[in-house]
Image (cartoon, rainbow, N blue to C red):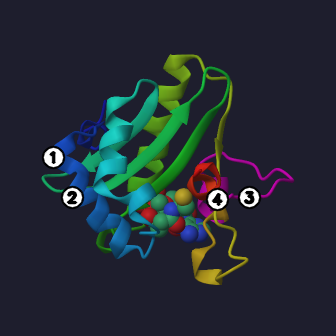
Amino acid sequence: MTLSDMKIRPAKNDDIDAVIRITRANGHFWTPEVDGSEALARILERDNNLFLVYDDGKVQGFVLGTWDGARAYIHKISVHPDIKTKGIGTLLVAHAIEFFRNIGAPTVAVAAADGTRDEEEDSTGFWKKVGFEPIPARLMIHFDVQKEIEP
Ligand SMILES: CC(C)(COP(=O)(O)OP(=O)(O)OC[C@H]1O[C@@H](n2cnc3c(N)ncnc32)[C@H](O)[C@@H]1OP(=O)(O)O)[C@@H](O)C(=O)NCCC(=O)NCCS
């Protein structure tokens, strides 16, 4: 284990503010229901969720994911803009893969922004560098789940 590896550790409730700060710094805070403190605290409460942080004295990066017993997904990775392209993202992905390997997952998928909306958001080059291959699929989302179940 290298010194950098020792900077990756499971997230704790105390890390949540820092995680939100990183998400905001990257312009990826979408909605409190998904990215806010209560949502992040729920991730920490549940089994088989991946939530790791990069902590070099200050939490500067994180990775989130889940395992449903058949498929493993990385939902989000974010490294503070001040320390990008120093290998932290690669390190977080390596630890995420190790987490899923140990839990028995055969594959790990990620929903990667492909730059269709904004070229600046294209992260597919990063994912290819850390061993992921594109597949012919598109992430789609239903935005009104709660609205539909209201009486
Ligand atoms: C994507 C992200 C996690 C990469 O983290 P990082 O610490 O900068 O990544 P690394 O330093 O480990 O980069 C590994 C390699 O990927 C390259 N890379 C990094 N981001 C890239 C991007 N968006 N597109 C193409 N290549 C990229 C690096 O230049 C490096 O290349 P090298 O091996 O030739 O030096 C980080 O840029 C980030 O937080 N972006 C904003 C959030 C985001 O887009 N998340 C992904 C969608 S879930």
Q: Residue at x 33, y 56 (%)?
A: 61
Rendering coords of residue 6 (x, y %): 25, 36
3D distance between C-alphas at marks 3 and 2: 28 Å
3D distance between C-alphas at marks 1 and 3: 32 Å
* Range of residues picked out in magenta: 125-144
108 on left or right of 29 = right
**Is tag 3's residue or tag 2's residue first in the polypeptide sequence?**
2
Q: Nearer the viewer, mark 4 or mark 3?
A: 3
Label 1 element class: helix
Q: Farthest residue in the right direction? A: 136
Q: Nearer the viewer, mark 4 or mark 2?
A: 2
Asked whether the viewer can see residue 104, the reply is yes
Would you name the residue on which mark 4 appears?
112
Q: Main secondary structure of the magenta part?
A: loop
**Is tag 4's residue or tag 3's residue first in the polypeptide sequence?**
4
The numbered mark at residue 140 is: 3
3D distance between C-alphas at marks 4 and 3: 12 Å
Q: Residue at x 32, y 36 (%)?
A: 44
Amino acid type at circle 1 is Asp
Query: Does 141 appear in magenta?
Result: yes
Amino acid type at circle 4 is Ala
Amino acid type at circle 2 is Asp
Q: Residue at x 61, y 20 (%)?
A: 69
Q: Are marks 3 and 2 in contact (CB under 8 Å)?
A: no
3D distance between C-alphas at marks 4 and 1: 28 Å
Q: Quadrant of residue 116?
A: bottom right
Q: Quadrant of the N terminus?
A: top left
Q: Residues within 10 Å of mark 2 (few under 14, many from 20)?
A: some
**Is tag 1's residue or tag 3's residue first in the polypeptide sequence?**
1
The numbered mark at residue 17 is: 2
Rendering coords of residue 11 (x, y %): 27, 40
**Is tag 4's residue or tag 1's residue first in the polypeptide sequence?**
1
